[in-house]
Amino acid sequence: MTKSPFKTLSLLLIILTSFLLTFSFLPEVRAETKILSITPLFGEVGTTIQLTANVSTQNGQYKLMFDEDELLSGDATGNDVTVSFSVPHTFEGNHTVMIVDTATGENSTATFAVIASYSLKTDVPEPPAQRQEGDSVKIFINITGGKPSYTYNLTVETPSENLTCEALPSINTNDVGDFYDNLTYPDDFSGGANTNLNGTYKILLNTTLATQPFSIGLTNCTEYHRFQTVDIKAIYKPEENVTLTISGEEVDHSENVTANSEGIIHYTNWTVPSNASMGTYMVNITSISADPTTKTPPDVQDFIVPGFDVNITTRNLAGEPVGNVALEAFENGKSVTKETSDLQGLAAMKLETGNFSCIATFEEHEVGNFSIEIDGERALYLDCNLTSMKVLVIDKDNNHIPFADVYVIPKNQTFSTNTDGTVVLHSLLSNLTYVLNASRYDTPFNTTTIQQLPLKDWYNITIVCPALALQLDVTDIQGQPLDVTVRVQDLTCGLVYHENTSNGKAVLNCTFGSYIIRTYVGEILLNETSVGLFQEENVRVVCKLYGLTISVRVVDYFGQPISNANVELQREGLSISPKRTESNGVAKFLNIIGGNLSVTVYMSGQTQPCVAATYSVEETKSIDVRIGKYIVLAGFLVETSQLTTAIIIVAALILVVLIEVYARRRHEPQKDSN
C-alpha cells in the first residue's frame, strides 16, 4: 500500500511541533559565577595572585574579597574576569578568596595559604671589615605574615660552649602576624651577654625559623696591605697584662700590653712592613697576669696580606692580544709571582704595595720588560717585541691565490691563504731567520728566506706563483686536428684561461696548479680532462664525440625496413638537418657530435611523429627504431591494427563458408547402393 503525500507531510509537521514545544520548556542556559583558577595557591604577604573567573551578569560589576575585606572591584568583559592582586598583610594559614557578582549576589570561593616570612639582619660591616671584641651589634627583626598576637623567642649563641643569651624585650606580633623592630646585642640580652670572645655568634628566631651569624674578631679587618696599621682590640680584666704577638713569613712581632681601667686592650702600634709577603699572618693574645683571664675559644685570629689585583694585557707591536706570554714579577731582585696570559692576552697577577720589575717571555725568548709601581688595583698593557707578518700570494697577473699553503720555519707549521690570497702570521719573534715554503696541491713552487725579521708592527711580503706553458693538441677520434674553444680552469681558486685552437694547436700560460681542460664547439662540451701543471706540459686531447657517423635504421613491426621515412636528430635542443631512409630503412648522418641525441621519426606525408626517443651516443653506431604501428606489405605501409582487423574478417568469412559446406554435405541424401 502506498502512502499519500498529504499524510507524509502531516507527520513531519507533527514531529517538528513536538521538538519546538520541548525546547520551549527547557530552562534558560546562563553563565555561572565561578572561580576558574587561582595562581599560585600559596605564598608570602605581597605575593601577586592571578585569578580567572566567570560571573553571571554579562559585563556586570564584580567585587573581589580576601576574607572579609574587599580588595578591588571592576566590570567583567562579557562574563569573564581576569585580575591580578597582591596578598594583603595577614597572618599565616588558609584564607578565603571570594568573587561576588554585585548584581545577583552570587559568589564563588577559593583557598589561598599564606606563608610566614622571617628575616634577621645585622649592621656588621661588609668584609673585610669586621666587629671587634667589646663592640655591640644591632639586630633588625622582620616577621611578616606570622602567627597573630604571638610571642617569638630570639636568642644568640656565643662562640663559647653552653652559653646562649635571650632577648629581654618581647617579640610579639600584631593581629595580622607582623613584627618590625631592632635590638642591640649585648645590651638588650640577658644571661651575661657580651662580645668578649673572638669567633662566630649565631642569632636564632625560635631556634629554627630564621638564623643569622655575625663575627667578632681581634682586628677591625681581616685583610691589610703594606703600610696599613693593624687595629687590634680585646677585652680582659682592668689593668690585666697580656702578651700580643703578630707572626707570619719573615714577621715575628711581640709586645706586652696592659688593659685600661675598663679592661680594654686597644693596640695600634704595628703597621704591615714594606717588605711583607702576601699570605696569612696570625694575631695571638695571651694573659700573663697572676689571675689570668681564660678565654674559650682563645684570642687567636688570622688576617691576610692579599695583594692588589694587577691585570696585564700582553700585546704584540701591532696592538693585538698575545696569549701564552709568561710574566714574572721581581721585587728587590726576588721573584714574587709568575703568571701566563690567556688567549685574550690577560695575565691576572697579585702584587702588594711597592715597586716591581717584570719580564715577559714568549716561546723561551724575552720579549719585553717594564717597571711598575703598585699602590692599588691596576690594569695596564704590555707591548711585547713581537712582529706580525702578512704573506700575499699572487700570480703574474696580480691575481690573489687562495688555498695556497705556506710552511713556516722555525714555527714548523703550515698556514693556508684565505680567499684574498693572504696568510697572516701573528706575533713572530723578531731578529730570527724565517723560511717560507709555498706550495699548491702539495707541490712546492717557492722558497723565501727572511734574514733577521725586523722589529716592527707589520712586515709584508709578496710571493709570486709562477706561470707555466700548457701546450694542447686537440684531435677527433680519427686523429684529425680540431679547431675548438679551450677553457682551462683551476680546481680551487677559479682562475680561467681561454684559447681557440689553430689546426688543433693552442698554447696557454697558466699559473702553477691543477686544472680541468674543457673543449667546446660553440656551447657543446666535447671533452673534459684533468692535468697537474707543475711543470711545462704537452697534453693531447682526443674529442671522441666529434665526427661520429650515426645510422638510424627504421623497421616495421616484423623488423622489415621502412623506406622514405623522415628522421630528425636533435642535440641539446639544436636540430640537425633531417634525412630520409633509403630502401634498406637506413638514414645516415655524418660528422655528428655525440652525447644525448633525440631521434624523431615521421612517416612520409605525416606531420605527427611516430617515434621520439633519446639515445646516449659516445661512438659511431647504428640505432634501430622499431615502429610497431606499421607493417610493410607488398611495398606499402599498412597499419598493424587495420591488417589485424582484415585478417580477422577474412578468417571469419572462411570459417562461415566451411561451416555452410559442412552443413550441406551432412544433409545431402545418400544414394542407394543396389
Image (cartoon, rainbow, N blue to C red):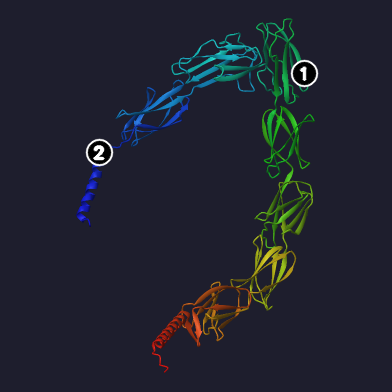
Name of the residue lying farthest toward the bottom: 674
Quarter containing the C terminus: bottom left
Across the whole image, how many numbered discs are drawn on residues?
2
Residue drawn 61% across and 22% down? Answer: 126
Sequence order check, earlier mark of 2 and 1: 2
Indicate left or right for 135 with 105 as reference: right
Q: Viewed as shown, does residue 6 lie left or right of 428?
A: left
Q: Is residue 533 visible?
A: yes
Q: Nearer the viewer, mark 2 or mark 1?
A: 2
Amino acid type indicated by mark 1: Asp
Front residue (pair 352, 404): 404
Quadrant assignment, res 477: bottom right
The residue where tag 2 is placed is 25
Say which element carries label 2: loop
In the displayed structure, does residue 431 sit left or right of residue 193?
Answer: right
In the image: residue 568, left or right of residue 443: left
Along the line of sight, the residue nearer the viewer: 129 or 90: 90
Give coordinates of residue 353: x percent, y percent.
71, 27
Q: Which residue is mark 1?
A: 252
Q: Is residue 270 visible?
A: no
Q: Residues within 10 Å of mark 1 (few under 14, many from 20)?
A: few
Q: From the top left corner, tell me how far across and down residue 514 is, in percent.
A: 70, 63
Q: Residues within 10 Å of mark 2 (few under 14, many from 20)?
A: few
